[in-house]
Amino acid sequence: MDFPQSPWSPSEEGGCPIMSAENNSNPGVLSGSTKVTIGIPVYNCERWIADTIRAALAQTWEHKEVIVVDDGSSDGTPELCRDFGDKIRFVAQGRRGGNAARNHLLRLASGDWVQFLDADDSLPPEKIAVQLGSQEAAGHDVICSPVTFEKRDGDRLVRRDSQRIAHPVDWKAEWLRWNLPQTGGCLWRRTALLRIGGWNEDYRFNQEYELYFRALKAGLKFALVDGPPAIYRLWSEDTVCRRDRSGVVLGKTRLIHAFLDWLETVMTPDSCSPYRRLAGVACFEMARTLAAQDLALARKYFLDRRREGLIALDGPAAPWKYRFTLGLLGFAGAEKLARLTRRSSAATAI
């Protein structure tokens, strides 16, 4: 696929720098002998898997291995993976779920660092080299870079949006904003990830944020590197998260409750207050998201969160017109009016 031009793209003179022990003279930068495992869990993804494996193999960081764990695919995915021969390690397991496949990858990994890459996503060639070659990498457990979100309609690229994470990073605030990088944006120190137990196989939704939560609680050190972004493709409605939006919302809310409970044990009430407000913004956004699927459930969710003090009318989901309508008509009435307004605007645009 085509990537937007970036400061890390190959030059006409020589291409991307390949990090090696010989050209790494900066003591604050990780040695090129550092090994990276690129782990790709896959299930029925014959459309993208070959492109994803090629992106992993194309990484300019020399000392790497690529492992693919198939989670019981019934389409042509296994054959496409086997076509790569000994360039990758391909392992098939029974249908056990995405997090079980990720943990299997973690057990198989021999790298010092692990790059998880979903089977329908991609990486620019220099992504890992820039992250591991940065000053910020040494002494940290999780190296993060923003990702690029690609919305696709069939083979057509509809929109490309770049994630923004402000410097300096308040990792707790970004967690509550749900603004930490998607899977492909991070490198995990393998020993640190094993220390916190890997991926939670009980989770079908919000897996990354559950993992981030445990990493923050355990005191893992995060670094933000302004590197070339991983590509997160939004191309199918037939995913677990999109089929069950209410499950995603309710699971996210449980995580937010647990996160706030943890903050209250490590911070003063005054220090916790800004984080509760961010949680309130997130819960209000989720109430509105839920309303598109089930208005009655969304109204109950809104009222429950308001009783808990976890509704904050702020952010893009709460423009002043909506806040005014909410005060007059209540949540269900405001949502019905918003729905009518959207339909009217869509009809006018046709």
Image: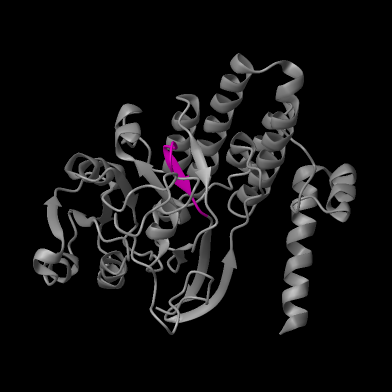
Q: Can residue 171 be seen in this view?
A: yes
Total marks placed: 0
Q: Nearer the viewer, residue 301 or 179?
A: 179
Q: Where is residue 344 in the image (x, y as percent from the top left)?
A: 77, 72
In the image, the segment drawn in magenta is: 138-145
Give the residue displayed 25% in from the left and 63% down from the top: 44
> x, y percentage for residue 171?
59, 37
User: How far from the left and from the top, in percent, is residue 126?
Assistant: 40, 65
Q: In this view, does 28 lie above or below 155?
A: above
Q: Look at the image and say whether residue 143 sits in the magenta stretch.
A: yes
Q: Closest to the observer: 68 or 87?
A: 87
Residues 33 and 192: in front is 33
Relative placement, left or right, of 293 versus 322 is: left
The colour scheme of the drawn protein is one colour
- Quarter of the image containing the N terminus? bottom left
Q: Please report the residue visible at 44 percent of the width from the left and 69 percent of the height from the top.
A: 235
What's the residue at 51%, 53% (across, down)?
145
On whether residue 39 falls in the magenta region, the answer is: no
Quarter residue 299 falls in: top right
- Tell me if residue 206 can be seen: no
Locate residue 154 relative to residue 57 in the image: left or right: right
Q: Is residue 14 above or below residue 40?
A: below
On-image quarter of the C terminus: bottom right
Q: Where is residue 181 in the image (x, y as percent from the top left)?
A: 51, 50
Prevalent SS, magenta region = loop
